[in-house]
Amino acid sequence: MNLSKQDYERMMKLTSTISIHYKKASIGLQEQLSQLLGYHSSILWKVDQKGNLSDPKIHRISDYLLEDYLDCFHTYDYLHPKKQLHLFREKVVLRLEDVTPIERYEHSDYYKEFMRKHNYFHEMVVTFRSHNKFVGALGITRSRLEGEFTEDDCHKVRMLAPMISNLLYLEGELEEQRIDKGILEAFAAKSETGLILLDEKYQTLYINPAAWNIYKNTVAYKDIDRFIKEIIFALSNQSIGSNPFLIETQGYNVQVISHQEPFLSKQSRYAIIIEKEKTIDTSEEEREFFQLTKREKEICYYLKRGYTYKKIAETLFISINTVNKHIKNIYQKTGVNNRALLQARLLEQQ
């Protein structure tokens, strides 16, 4: 299909603009699609491999519509990725008329009670895939007056989809690294736990203040480098897999975690965790965790292993929204308000 020179120029400009801010590609994407291609009303979603949608970003769409959609009408949506998953594995873009006759759509509850209520008629959904997995979905809608989505529209988004997919994938990877960093920082801030990060050549990347304090209180080692070398020697004489091992020394427990543990960032090869031996206090703080339900404890188990909310949902065969509800309950019961702090608390309990 031949597009106009102006269309190609606009698409090149869009590609150039969002590529500059690749670390946050999703933020400017919808505005650029509106300005350059006329796709004014849209919702950008994260989507898992079963077609479940989460984390919506709206552009020129009311909060009321989004609330209406999430509360009820997502189950009626003809183009919901979960409903059309088999088609989206083969096709990048689908319009309403690609999956149902327009006459039937006009008589449906989805149109009469939802789309017409919010003054929309036409709908087109684009899915983004990279590295053999879904990384996002974009729902675009128009009123009757704005006109239908044409074959030209489909052709444009098909051409843009590979580039957008790769940028969204990269953004997701960077976000996971930021989460890893947040978990490490929250854990490292624990006043009684020492943390030392090493790269693949056993060079020291980071030593937190608690590790220095523990070192100063340890008589057996004249300097911290010697202490680290002792740990490295132990590493070289034991088979390291994904499981940690413990070394008992001078009243301290020293735990070494290899790079295969999800807790570590992609830059760190090993983490040395140093804790002073202490009796287990199962009083107030631990009782908070005893109050959790069986399902909440399961989710905590996978959080300790570094699973993302999406992966927890896939593992437990529940929706991402259900995971989020359980996480909110866990926050309430444990007195934390973000994932990094919860991860640190769970590691402390472990």
Image: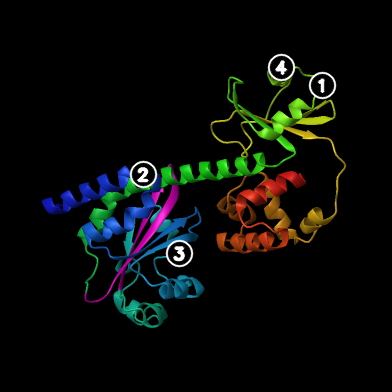
Please tell me whether residue 301 is drawn above or below residue 290 in the rendered image: above
Q: Earlier in the sequence, mark 2 or mark 4?
A: 2
Give the image location of residue 36, x and y in percent: 22, 57
Residue 22's tag is: 2
Q: Which callout, 4 or 1, points at the residue further toward the start of the chain?
A: 1
Instruction: Identify residue type, mark 4.
Output: Arg
x 76%, y 47%: residue: 349
- Label 2 – label 1 distance at C-alpha: 50 Å
**Labels 2, 1: front one:** 1
Mark 2 vs mark 4: give the one in front.
Answer: 4
Q: Amino acid at mark 3?
A: Lys
Residue 209, image x, y percentages: 67, 33
Please name the amino acid that badge 2 sits on.
Tyr
* Mark 3 residue element: loop
Q: Residue at x 40, y 57 (%)?
A: 137
Q: Residue furthest right?
A: 279
Q: Which residue is mark 1?
A: 219
Q: Residues within 10 Å of mark 1 (few under 14, many from 20)?
A: few
Residue position marked by numbered label 3 in the rendering: 83
* Quadrant position of residue 230: top right
CA gap between label 4 and label 3 equals 60 Å
Label 4: few (<14), some (14–19) or many (≥20) C-alpha neighbours in 10 Å: few
- N-terminal label among 2 and 1: 2
Quarter assignment of residue 83: bottom left
Spatial CA span between label 3 and label 1: 65 Å
Count of labels in the image? 4
* Residues rendered magenta in the picture: 122-145
